[in-house]
Image (cartoon, rainbow, N blue to C red):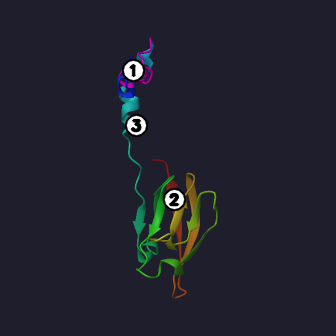
Amino acid sequence: MKRSPLVALALVLPLMMAGCTPTASPDSSSHDMTPESAASAGAQALSPTIVSPGELATREATVVVATELVIAAPDGTEADWTGTTADPTIAEFSAGGASEGAVFRPGFEARKVGKTAATLTGPDGQTISFTISVVAP
């Protein structure tokens, strides 16, 4: 008697699939999410602080650590802005401009909690001096 390959596949397939199903572990409760871990898993990233160059001349810029102070530079001038900080371990300038089909605004990356003096120079050569205060979330 000759068996067709389809019948053989129908007999073998359930056995192969049984090896692919997850098994219950005796300690499955260790993988349950507590309310605290569920809250942290659902936490969203903090948004950047966005300011216009004119706003920097009149105030201290406060930024949450691990976020960015984004400069709302006029469209088309993003790559023409430069900046510095007295302490790049607290905050560091990040140049703007086009990259891989996207346009990024210039800004400062908040690296650790603290204060640092900063400058921002526009395409017209005007330099704005201000303070960046990096705070904990």
Nearest to the observer: residue 100 or residue 67: 100
Q: Secondary structure at mark 3?
A: helix
Q: Secondary structure at mark 2?
A: strand
x 57%, y 52%: residue: 112
Verify whether residue 48 appears in magenta. Answer: no
Q: Nearer the viewer, mark 3 or mark 2?
A: 3
Nearest to the observer: residue 14 or residue 50: 14
> Which mark is first along the chain, 2 or 1?
1
Circle 3 sits on which residue? 41
- The single residue placed furthest to the front in the displayed view is 1
Query: Magenta segment, which residues?
Result: 9-26
Verify whether residue 21 appears in magenta. Answer: yes
- The residue type indicated by label 2 comes to Ser
Q: Are marks 1 and 3 in contact (CB under 8 Å)?
A: no
135 relative to 75, above or below:
above
Task: Name the quarter where the N terminus is drawn.
Answer: top left
Q: CA distance from mark 3 to mark 2?
A: 28 Å
Circle 1 sits on which residue? 2
For residue 60, say whether it is visible.
Answer: no
- The residue type indicated by label 3 comes to Ala
Q: Residues within 10 Å of mark 3 (few under 14, many from 20)?
A: few
Q: Quadrant of residue 51?
A: bottom left
> Which mark is first along the chain, 3 or 1?
1
Q: CA distance from mark 1 to mark 2?
A: 81 Å
User: Residue 119 location, x and y as percent?
Assistant: 56, 73
Circle 2 sits on which residue? 133
User: Residue 94 location, x and y as percent?
Assistant: 56, 67
Q: CA distance from mark 1 to mark 3?
A: 57 Å
x 41%, y 30%: residue: 37
Q: Secondary structure at mark 1?
A: loop
User: Residue 35 location, x and y as percent?
Assistant: 35, 27
